[in-house]
Amino acid sequence: MPSFRLALIQPITVPPPDDDRNVAAAVEWIGRAAGAGAHFVCFPESYPGPWRMPAKFDPHAAIAEAAARHGVYTVYGTIEPIDAQKATAYNLTCMAWPDGRAPARYRRTHPNGPWIYTGGKFWEFQYVAGNDYPVFDTPHGTVGLAMCSEVYMPEVARALALRGAELIFMPAGLDKRRLWETWRTLLWARAIENLALVVSTQNLLGAQDRGLSIVAAPETILHESTVAGMAVIEVSLDRVRELRAGRDSVGSSQRCGAKEGVLSEQWQRPELYDSFHPRPLPAAAQ
């Protein structure tokens, strides 16, 4: 399969109340990425925004138009308002298409809401969790969308992988501070255990922030950067597909840096999985 290029954008982001300024910057980044030969552009969580309810702008038309004009897939973040009076919204990771169709949407599923986006300095809305794990076919491979601290919930990436996702975008929010090491580890772990390419990048509010722009493959980290800017990485899904199609055997560790076939019947025992949560879970934490 031919290789393709990922453009990871780690911007200096304008936070609320002026986050609408990120839309024009995002459009400019898309043009720059396309000029560098990118097939996919990945922005951070909530970029270009908005970050708060009530939502004062809608970025979809501008991002979709730029993606179609430049012929690139563009992964970006925003919210989907539900009830303005209650300030409820889904948090979205979206993907605009190079052919101009309506952007694909993933509604964040984990954790239980609404606490995660209330009471802070930047995000402010009553988060409602989604319930679906859509995947999206492209000529370059099958794409799954997730976001941010869902990396701590292995079920999210596994659900996408079991539905066929080979390229999983998990864009993130802000500086990870003391979480940085575990966050990086888990992004790679999601690639290892799902035999996928996992891609993430984050917002920087200034040059002092430590970013985490990364492309993790099952056997190695293909790209990593902590600074603001754009990185264009050439990747292929050939090895991912080879590892998925393979079967673990004696001596596999001499030629494989990750376990082969872990999504196959050689490893999977789905008849056991409903026993993991035999009772309904308690109500969401508030």
Image: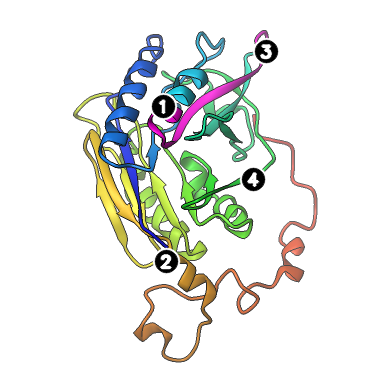
Residue for point 46% across, 43% down = 170
Left/right of residue 86 with respect to residue 30 in the rendered view: right
Q: Mark 1 points at which residue?
A: 69
Camera-near label (1 vs 3) is: 1
In the rendered image, residue 166, in percent from the top left (x then y), is placed at 50, 57
Give the magenta-colored segment's residue range. Answer: 67-86
Q: Mark 3 points at which residue?
A: 86
First along the sequence among labels 1 and 3:
1
Question: Of residues 238 and 90, which is closer to you in this image?
Answer: 238
For label 4, the crowd category at 10 Å Cα-Cα, with few meaning under 14, some 14 to 19 and many 20 or more, is: many
Q: Can residue 16 be seen in this view?
A: yes
Q: Are marks 4 and 3 in contact (CB under 8 Å)?
A: no
In the rendered image, residue 54, in percent from the top left (x then y), is placed at 56, 10
Residue 53 sits in quarter:
top right
259 versus 254 height, above or below = above
Residue 9 sits in quarter:
top left
Camera-near label (1 vs 2) is: 1
Q: Can residue 50 be seen in this view?
A: no
Residue 87 sits in quarter:
top right
* Residue type (three-letter) at the residue carrying disc 1: Arg
Q: Mark 1 falls on what kind of element? A: helix
* Residue type (three-letter) at the residue carrying disc 4: Tyr
Question: Of residues 126 and 108, which is closer to you in this image?
Answer: 108
